[in-house]
Image (tube, rainbow, N blue to C red):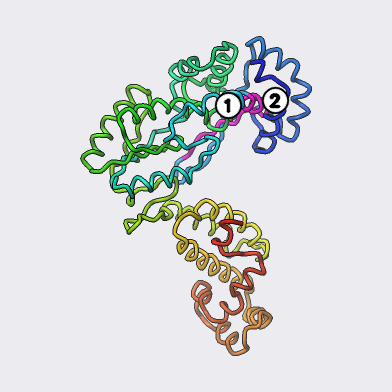
Amino acid sequence: MEAICAPDNLAAALKVVMRNKGSPGVDGITVSSASGVLAARWPKIQADLLAGRYRPDPVLRVKIPKPDGGERNLGVPTVIDRVIQQAVLQQLQPQWDPTFSEHSYGFRPGRSAHQAVRQAQAYVIEGYRFVVDIDLAKFFDRVNHDRLMAQVAGRVADKRVLRLIRAYLTAGVLEDGAVEESREGTPQGGPLSPLLSNLVLDELDRELERRGHRFVRYADDCNIYVRSEKAGRRVMQSLTGFIERRLKLQVNTAKSAVDHPWARSFLGFTVKNEPGFPLAIAKTALTRFKNRVRELTGRHRGIALESMIRELVPFLRGWAGYFGISQKRELGSLDGWIRRRIRCVAWVQWKTIGQRYRELRRLKVPERTASEVVFSTKGPWRLSLTTAMHRGFSKARFKSLGLLAMETLVHA
């Protein structure tokens, strides 16, 4: 606990929390005011931590939509509690992380989702053509506190730290003005939750290693690769029993499956059933991408084209940076679709025949070509493919507006 409360450790924790920003917790204190508030309250907080009597505030429950249409519960701790959790994390992670499985990639320094996806692809290339795709139902909400604290106690001797971690697990949740007791789970949203989740699932990793399986785990996404469907069914049945009886967690049978890897997705990717089993973007990830682009490029948003592109580019840069390890031709196809949507926006914003003609001529479209398109009765989507709109909004024109090809953004 003395190491957790050390000035250098606390200053580093505060810096991380401020960099990550985020919403206020139940006390309404913002990240921008955290430094001053912490400085004023620290003598009392430090005394309570060192005496083992600190009690965190309840977390604020926030519901965010999931890609599959459901909702995910996030627990937002107060900014002060986020700083303390981060200070604890900075002391525990360097000790615990080296002991975790090499097959675990989520929330770990020096490891990434891309590494997990590449390893999964490598197993398929090696000849493991079936995957046991296990989905844990509401994992973060169902972690057993007693089992987790027993594992923590096996690694931490300081009883003050143990009491503090249990206090965070049982702090409760504020929702609709009422505090709900926390009997299980480790709320998503706190800095400590990812480390604690890896500790919980390290037992699953060790069991898979003991059985000699090829597997990849990223947080609660776990894929085991086998050579036959029969072997996959056997592994699914035995692991479901282990997870539910031993770990006290629940397997979501509706989302778990034994299938060919090219029929499943992992971290937004899949593999193609082609020579070399190249990586491809999963259909669900493409659907989410297109839905978001449709929101940003709505024809009737009422903002200037330049402003629309400025909003769009950061999303495209982040998306391309993650999915750029897939087949490059996928990005090129999406680029063409995005440009077509923006041509539609321009056409709708011009509104009248006269304005459309003047704008096309201003963009150096020949008089006859412009005249042909402005009197067309076709809709904006069809007209976005015309020669006039392509000449008016060429790739060079889009580049001048700040819209670069996603393949260019991959390494930008």
Q: Nearer the viewer, residue 186 or 207?
A: 207
Residue carrying label 2: 10
Question: What residue lies at 39% left-to-right and 51% top-to-bottom?
Answer: 270
Is 51 above or below relative to 250? above
Q: Residue 361 at x, y = what percent?
A: 66, 83
Binning the other alpha carbons within 10 Å of mark 1 as few (below 14), some (14 to 19) or many (20 upward) gives many
Q: Is residue 113 above or below residue 385?
A: above
Magenta segment, which residues?
71-87
Q: Which residue in the structure is indicated by mark 1? A: 174
Residue 242: x and y in percent read 31, 26
- In the rendering, at what x and y percent does residue 85 appear? 61, 25
Query: For the point 39% across and 56% down, which residue is it?
Result: 278
Labels 1 and 2: the sequence-earlier one: 2
In the rendering, which numbered label is found on residue 122? none
The x, y position of residue 57, in whole percent, is: 63, 22
**Quarter where residue 22 is shown:** top right
Looking at this view, name the residue that lies furthest to the left. Answer: 230
- How far is disc 1 from disc 2 in space, using C-alphas? 27 Å
The amino acid sitting under disc 2 is: Leu
Amino acid on which disc 1 is placed:
Leu
Q: Nearer the viewer, mark 1 or mark 2?
A: 2
* Image quadrant occupied by the N terminus: top right
Identify which residue is drawn at 43% across, 27% down: 202
